[in-house]
């Protein structure tokens, strides 16, 4: 569920990591999901930052102390914390599942707005698996779709020259059973 393991972490440190992972996921969504104005990921994220400021700050402090405790020097601890943050953010890259990630993040961010202050950790424990599951590759030619009804989808044949005319791409020319026009 977490982007990276935290060996020897206490329950409080694991809770802080879950809070920070969920915050990172919602931050990535606020940046990546602005293509859909009805997806309120950015305004919801800003509201979450205000409403859960204390818990978010405390979780970062706890994570910082974990890395300082588990590394020999403060510099090594800070480097490990920075690397952890990079791994967390990178783990929410949604290039291959942007729509499902954005829709899920919108739903989770909406739930976070209505989560009482001090309970963001419980929401994180509940919703991190949901966010992670939304990152399943779906809808690209390189990766097979996972949903049974999507298996019937036929991709456009952009490489087939018979599907084009002077006006552009003509899907009807490439539909199953369509008569092929001979090229001269």
Image (tube, rainbow, N blue to C red):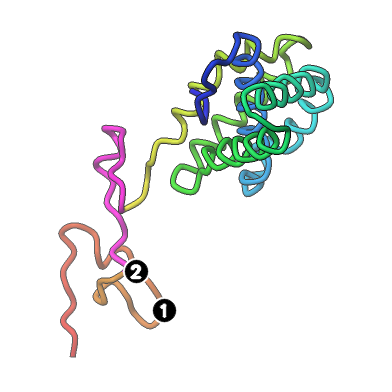
Q: Is residue 99 found left or right of 56 in the rendered image?
A: left
Find numbered disc 1 in the image and state the secondary structure of the residue it sits on. Answer: loop
Q: Is residue 153 found left or right of 26 in the rendered image?
A: left
Query: Pointer 1: what residue?
Result: 167
Q: Is residue 65 found left or right of 83 in the rendered image?
A: right
- Range of magenta residues: 142-158
Q: Between residues 57 and 79, which one lies in front from this camera angle?
A: 79
Q: Say few, some or many: other residues with alpha carbon within 10 Å of mark 2 (under 14 / 14 to 19 / 20 or more).
A: some
**Residue 84 position by quadrant:** top right
Residue at 31% x, 60% y is 156
Q: Between residues 21 and 101, which one lies in front from this camera angle?
A: 21
Task: Give the x, y percent position of residue 77.
Answer: 67, 32
Q: Which mark is residue 64?
A: none
Find numbered disc 2 in the image and state the secondary structure of the residue it sits on. Answer: loop
Task: Give the x, y percent position of residue 7.
Answer: 52, 20
Rendered position, 141 above or below 13: below
Rendered position, 40 above or below 167: above
Residue at 79% x, 23% y is 57
Residue at 63% x, 49% y is 35
Question: Would you say residue 143 sits in the magenta stretch?
Answer: yes
Question: Would you say residue 183 sits in the magenta stretch?
Answer: no
Residue at 55% x, 42% y is 90
Query: Pointer 2: what residue?
Result: 170
Rendered position, 146 above or below 109: below
Q: Overall secondary structure of the magenta stretch?
A: loop
Discs 1, 2 touching: Cβ within 8 Å: yes
Rendered position, 52 above or below 163: above
**Residue 31 position by quadrant:** top right
């Amino acid at each position: 569920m977490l982007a990276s393991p935290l060996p020897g972490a206490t329950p409080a440190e694991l809770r802080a990591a879950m809070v920070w992972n969920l915050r990172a996921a919602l931050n990535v969504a606020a940046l990546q999901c602005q293509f859909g104005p009805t997806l309120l990921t950015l305004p919801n994220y800003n509201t979450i930052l205000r409403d859960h400021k204390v818990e978010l700050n405390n979780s970062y402090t706890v994570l910082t102390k974990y890395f300082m405790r588990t590394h020999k020097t403060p510099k090594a601890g800070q480097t490990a914390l920075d690397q952890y943050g990079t791994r967390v953010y990178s783990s929410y890259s949604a290039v291959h599942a942007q729509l499902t990630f954005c829709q899920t993040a919108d739903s989770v961010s909406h739930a976070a707005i209505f989560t009482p202050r001090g309970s963001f950790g419980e929401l994180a424990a509940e919703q991190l698996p949901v966010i992670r599951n939304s990152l399943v590759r779906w809808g690209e030619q390189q990766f097979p779709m996972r949903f049974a009804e999507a298996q019937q989808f036929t991709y456009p044949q952009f490489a087939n020259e018979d599907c084009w005319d002077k006006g552009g791409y003509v899907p009807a020319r490439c539909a199953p059973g369509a008569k092929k026009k001979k090229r001269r």
